[in-house]
Amino acid sequence: MHDLIITGRIISGESWFDGAIAIDGGKITWVRREKPPKNIAGEYHDYGSRYIMPGIVDTHVHFRDPGLTEKEDFGTGSISAAFGGVTTVLDMPNTIPPVIDTVSLVDKNNISSRSSVIDYGLYMGIIDESSPRTIDKELSGSGKAPPPSAYKCFLGESTGKLILRDINNIQKSLHYADIVKRKMSVHAEDGGILERYKDRESTGGLLEGHLKRRPWQAETVAISRLKDVSGRYARSIHLLHISSSSGINAARGTRCTIEVTPHHLFFDMENTRNLETPSFAKVNPPIRTRSDRAALWEGISRGDVQTIGSDHAPHKIEEKSDGVNPPSGMPGVETMLPLLLNEVSKKNITIFRITNLLSSNPTKIFGIKNKGMIKEGYDADLVVFDISKKRRIRSEDLHSKCGWSTYEGMYGIFPEAVYSIGEKIIEGDNLLCGAGRGANVCAHPP
C-alpha cells in the first residue's frame, strides 16, 4: 500500500506521458507509464487528461516580513504563492531590519517557520561591512537557524539602502560563495550611472521619466564591473531581473546565470499606456521598450536565460496609486505560472521550457536538493492544471495582502491542485493547509 497515487499526463524532461506517481512519506516512490489499480493506495487521485508538472521554485520574492507587514507577510505571501503553483520560495533580505547578520537571519527564520504554508529559503544581504564567513561560523552548531540559501547584493540604490560598493568585498564574498556553493544574486544596476541620471527630466509620463533615470547603461555597466572583479567566480553570480537587450548581450558568455521577470516579459513602454493605473508598472529596473521585451523572449528561446523569477514586491494600493512618486515593485508570485501557461496554450513557448525555467533550473542553480523534478526520491511537490481552462486575472481572486495586480484583465491558466511534500494544499479555490507547515530548504551548510 502506498500513501497516495496520482495519475495524469506527467511532464518529464522534454516529453509527457500518461502515467502514475506513487508517494510515500511525502517523497515520490516511483513514476510509471501506467495507471495501477486503486486498491494499492490509501488515497488515489486520477486527473485524467490534466497535466502534472513539478512544483514551481520562485527564487525571487519579497514577502516583506519583518517590518513591512502592512504590504505582505510570510503567511499571506506563501498562500498567494501556493495558489500560483509555487511550492518553494527564496525570500529577499531588504526588509526592516534588513537581513544582514546572524540576529536578523534567525529572527526571519523564526517568523517564516511559524507562518509559511510552503517550503522556503532565506537570502542574506551583503553590504560593505558584511562577512558571510563570520555569519556562517556564528550559526554553525548553534541550532538557531540554517545558514542562508543564497546571498544578495545591490550595486546601486533600489528599494532600501543595501548597497555593496567595496570591490574587495565583492571579490571576497564571491570567493566564499564559491567555496560553500551558494549563489550571489546581484541587482545589476550600477550606482554611478543611476547617480548621473537621477535628475533627468522627462516630457512623458511617470514611467517614461523612470526609464530615463534608470537607463539600460546602468545594467550593462554593472555587468561589466562584475566581469572585471569576478574572474573564475563568475559562476557563483546569478544576475537578477535582466531587462534589456544590451543586458542580455553583456551577460552572454560570462558564466553567470541569468533571471528575467514576468513583468519585463509581458510589459513594455508601449502597452503600459493601456493600463488604468500606469504607476502599478513602476519597477526597478524599469519597464523598457518593445524591442527590449522581444530580446528577453529571444534570450529564453536561445538558452541565454536560465530562470524566471517573479520579483514579487507588493505595496499598499494607496502607495502605488500615487501618480507622482510611487514605490517600485509589483506583486507577481501568484500570476507568474498562470501567465506563462497561457503562453504555452498559445504555442509561444513549450511547457518543457517553462518547467526548466521555473522548476529544474532553479533547484540546480541554487542547490536545492530533491525538488524541481518528478523523479523517484524527490519531494512530491506537484502542480495539476488543465491547459484548456484559462480565465481573466482579477485582483479580487488573488491572495496577496496588497489587493491589486498589474496583470488585471489578462488571461492565465491557474492550477487545479497543488501538492507540497505529498500533501494537497490547494484544490481549486480552496486552501487545505495551515500556517507553519513549510520548512527551510537550505541545502548547503558550510
Image (cartoon, helix red, strand yellow):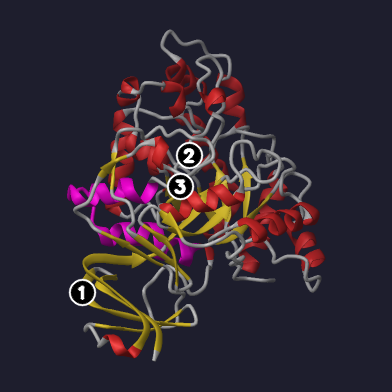
Residue at numbered disc 2: 331
Vertical comparison of 377 with 64: above or below: below
Residue at numbered disc 3: 333
Image quadrant assignment for residue 110: bottom right
Q: Position of residue 364 (x, y in %)?
A: 47, 67
Q: Which badge, 1 or 3, is on the more N-terminal residue? A: 1
Q: Position of residue 399 (x, y in %)?
A: 47, 44
Q: Is residue 158 left or right of residue 86?
A: right
Give me the C-alpha separation between circle 1 and circle 2: 34 Å
What crowding class fits label 1: few (fewer than 14 Cα within 10 Å), some (14-19), or many (20 or more)?
some
Dot 2 falls on a residue whose secondary structure is loop
**Is residue 254 at all visible to an observer of this figure?**
no
Predominant SS along the magenta part: helix
Amino acid type at circle 1 is: Phe
**Is residue 89 at all visible to an observer of this figure?**
yes
Identify the mark at residue 17; answer none if there is no mark: 1
The region drawn magenta spans 336-365
The residue under the point 44% across, 20% down is 207
Is 77 inside the magenta-drawn segment?
no
Q: Quadrant of the C terminus?
A: bottom right
Near-viewer residue (186 or 254): 186
